[in-house]
Amino acid sequence: MGTSQPPGSGGTNESGEAPVQVAPPTTDGETTVTEEGSELERSIGLKGGVAIGVGTMIGAGIFVFPGLAAGRAGPAAAGSFAIGAVVALLVALPASELATAMPKSGGGYYFISRALGALPGAVVGISIWLGLVFATAFYLVGFGNYAAALLAEAGVPVGGVPVVVPLALVFGVALTVLNLFGTENAAKLQNYVVGVLLTILVAFLGYGGLDAVGVFGNASTPETFFPRGVMPMFTTAALVFTSYLGFAQVATVAGDIKDPGRSLPLAMVGSVVIVGVLYVSTIFVATSAFGSEALSRFGETAIVEVARAYFGNAGALAILVAGLLATVSSANASILSTSRAVFAISKDALVPQYASRLNLTYGTPHVALAMAGGPVLVLVALGEVEVLAEVASFLHLVMYGLMCVALVAMRRDEPEWYDPDFRVPAYWLVAGVGAVASFALIGFMQRASQIIGLAIMVAAAGWYKYYASDVRLKGVL
């Protein structure tokens, strides 16, 4: 057993700022109360937590991957998504235990910095800040593309003017401002958007599934399950795992979650299960409507053509609306999470603490939100966000692997304050497999993404050595 505050913990950065250290928080269900007053208001309930997890994950998996995955593995792509869900759960369980022990803003950064030390924490915290910026820019450009396609499908003339980037910029500004004027407003938008999105998807997949098994006509079950053998199912799992990268955003906003001991594990595990079922169902319905070769030729618009096959042009229009909502929910949750990552590393003096100032009227970290939304808008305006989106996946996988390592370290050291409401059974096995799976998936990524991701991590380590090498966080709550 260790101690709650190691001797000599703290230190200062180049500006003479020390980490904001407070006593273990007591939660009244609404606000985290510390010796120094209140932190962020806890305004997000269990439903909101699930909406953040589902809303962040559901975009790429449903609307981009069916054609690509079916082209690689055929109907066995459903097995690829199921494997991805299992790996995600192996990481979500350790993350849930750590989150109930440390329900603070920053999520993976916070866990790793307290279990493994300030240097790995700084590398993950700064990397995830940038990674979430990349991902948000990707989601906003996706929003612009869906909005443009929806206008074209509905016959709305735009006079030949390119509208993708302008629409993405306008909506990026709108979401950042919405988050500035209160987390509760952003959470309400997330709940509504994810609710409508799930309604459309469940209706579409429900009808398509019943049609495929012959309830509305002749059964049209998929071709041979393994048309290219078993191995493509596993290699395709590495491709589609990026669909599950959003569940940890729930932990990133843990400082805003009501009743964190109960809500955090349920939100993270529940969102992975919900999204996993939707992904597997989508592949079944898609490969029943068309063969995997035809789906592969459709590419990233495959799911739109599947909807058109079942419901005509109205179905295509509805699925485009769903795609639009999916990108809105992903971008909104990512802006919220990005600002909390900046807020957390700023409170720990790894970057200037000016960034962790709160707006006293709305209780939101307005500087951190600007440091999230500003770079996103620059990237959207510059374009070229697809490679950066895979870099974001690289950085998330590094964080996931280190979260599993952090759980083992925390169980080994057991600081006096470590008292999670949820404990992972067989934690060595679960965390070990989760870490190995996370790091192994990095090997299947493009070389450019690996190089850029490593360069960002090295730069983050360099910043820590220059600005905050005396800051110590290991074992400090």
Image (spheres, rainbow, N blue to C red):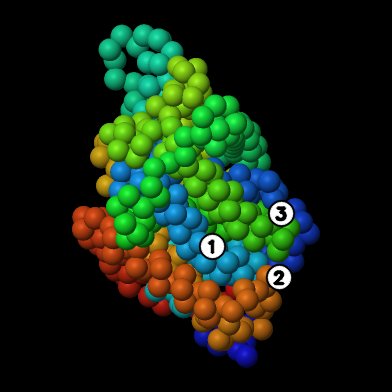
Secondary structure at badge 3 equals: loop
> Where is residue 248 shown, x and y percent of the image?
52, 57
| Disc with the residue nearer the chain's start (3 vs 2) | 3
Q: Quadrant of residue 446?
A: bottom left
The residue tagged 3 is 258
Distance Cα–Cα, label 3 vs label 2: 14 Å
The residue tagged 1 is 89
Secondary structure at badge 1 equals: helix
Residue 180 visible in the displayed image: no
Residue drawn at x 46%, y 73% as measured from the top left: 433
Q: Quadrant of residue 477?
A: bottom right
Residue 323 visible in the displayed image: yes
Horizontal arrangement in the rendering, residue 269 relative to residue 318 (left or right): right
| Disc with the residue nearer the chain's start (1 vs 2) | 1
View extreme (bottom): residue: 1
Residue type highlighted by circle 1: Leu
Distance Cα–Cα, label 1 vs label 2: 18 Å
